[in-house]
Image: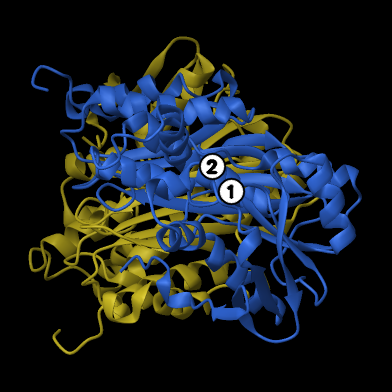
Chain colours: A blue, B yellow
Amino acid sequence: MSGMMQIWQLGEQGLLQRLQRFCPPDIIGDDAAVLSFPPQQSLVVTSDTLVDGVHFSPQTTAPEDAGWRAVAANLSDLAAMGAEPLAITVSLALPRETEVAWVEALYGGMAACLERFATPLVGGDVCRSQQAVIAITAFGSVMRPIYRHQAQVGDAIAVTGPHGAARAGLELLLQDGQWRDLDPQIRQNFICAHQRPLPRLDLLAPLKQLGVERLAGMDSSDGLADAVLQLARASGVKAQLWGDRLPMPAGLSQMVDSDQARDWLLWGGEDFELVLCLAPEAAERLSQVVEGVSIIGEIVAGQGAVLQLGDRLETLAMDSGFCHF
Amino acid sequence: MSGMMQIWQLGEQGLLQRLQRFCPPDIIGDDAAVLSFPPQQSLVVTSDTLVDGVHFSPQTTAPEDAGWRAVAANLSDLAAMGAEPLAITVSLALPRETEVAWVEALYGGMAACLERFATPLVGGDVCRSQQAVIAITAFGSVMRPIYRHQAQVGDAIAVTGPHGAARAGLELLLQDGQWRDLDPQIRQNFICAHQRPLPRLDLLAPLKQLGVERLAGMDSSDGLADAVLQLARASGVKAQLWGDRLPMPAGLSQMVDSDQARDWLLWGGEDFELVLCLAPEAAERLSQVVEGVSIIGEIVAGQGAVLQLGDRLETLAMDSGFCHF
């Protein structure tokens, strides 16, 4: 990689000038960005930080993909709240030896995801560090927010798509060669699920059109089981998942046995789907209107979450999740 | 420091629980914070990142002060845009050996500054890194934004207070002992200017009350001369500062000679005052209403910025500023 320009050679102003072409030209050059805000809506704000070696690594993540995923994770949090995105800001802390091409590829990936969801990058800053840290803040607007605490006994638990595919994609990248015989299309789907996840902002319009009166929801970025547990805890209810209705991705059974597949599905994380609790009729209507939506369980009285496997009930416990420290 | 608890001992959830007491209780626990937004205003967003060893260091900055300054810098950017603050979010990347007491002191300093300006901390996240990075995003609302590009020939250049005090405070902390005979009150004022700067949100009400029709402005976080140059460049005009009207802090002449004092005043940075370009009558009225506001120069035809020292004109050049790489 010698011969490629590093950011200290450009200097802060030179780097910022290169990055400004990813921003709309009219918002550049003041102490802060000014954005028009839709009337009678609330502001929704979410932040997410990615650290080199923790959330992405050269082995599994090209800079374009790191950028895409960072944006997708933030937009997914907005979708989880029922909010339409307005804009994002990006704060970058970078080692001075970072290659300019790497930073531009990172921004290219962010811009690609932002463009898909018609959302501008409106600011941020760049400073020096020993390790690359990408802190993104996304903001959106919402008329009626979707909270976690509004699940009720009798609700159906619906998900917007399969789970475990992102984890399968990660494993394929980490252990290249172990699954040589896997169908190339399935391989591609799993890797794409990991590298280019799509936040489910497309659900907002049908939820509005169906006039769903009350629902609880969040995204499944930390895993399906984690989302179900969080929803149950916030609402003071119990979630019961049906083992024969778990949203298994096509082809996962070709990679691993059923126990491993269920583990990835429940705890793999980073699928960025929505998990919703709502009246069974509303869930049914939603599943008819939006492809991929399925009902995977129900809310009952009690606490925590269980998985029904035939006659057996397996308790889902929180401590299987990812801890940052 | 052995025996003090480190953040890996608490874990991510334990740490987040400790930090949540700095947030309003009603906004906790969803994927994003929801905030009501004042009608018919625009959203203003600004981000700022602080890196351990670059923007703060154990020698000069207690964690309380690092927290205060990080918040003050962001609120100052809002003030520069004419915006009232709504909320901030904080993203922390921390080494796992970081002491819990340090993080709580950091948040304590942030909370103290936020409380002074009645602004809530509404979210953020925490993750692991090799070096502490604090990324803050601040949100505000504004009816009529203050931009940099609206200075006109004939405008007065006004500042809201003295400059160079923060730099003097930093030097006192770095070179303890060099100025033993300095008046203790002056010492205290300079150190306080460095450690606990106050964003000039108090200017927004008088600017509104005076009905100032048009003005250009920004804050002086990167230095007074830098602000003047940025305003001139953005507006396509020339700034002329009067050497005998430079806003010198009381007592600076007791510390250093006049050349050094002028250098700190012009280029020291981090004073977080506002630099405004507006009609001379409006500037005059403002200086009568708000203590500390003074007129230090004028906008003329041309480009760049000069400092008038007696009969001599000295050119102010951009490259004296701080570069992050």
User: What residue is shown with label 1?
Assistant: A162
Based on the displayed image, in which of its 4 quarters is residue A228 positioned?
bottom right
Let me know if residue B272 appears in the view.
no
- Chain that bears disc 1: A
The amino acid type of the residue labelled 2 equals Ala
Extreme residue in the front direction: A311
Q: Nearer the viewer, residue B305 or A160?
A: A160
User: Against A296, is B210 above or below?
Assistant: above
**In this picture, residue B74 sits left or right of residue B223:** right
Element class at badge 2:
loop
- Chain that bears disc 2: A
User: What residue is shown with label 2?
Assistant: A250
Q: Residues within 10 Å of mark 1 (few under 14, many from 20)?
A: some
Element class at badge 1:
loop
Q: Quadrant location of the C terminus of chain B? A: top left
Number of the label disc, if any, that sits on residue B83: none
The amino acid type of the residue labelled 1 equals Pro
Give me the C-alpha separation between circle 2 and circle 1.
8 Å
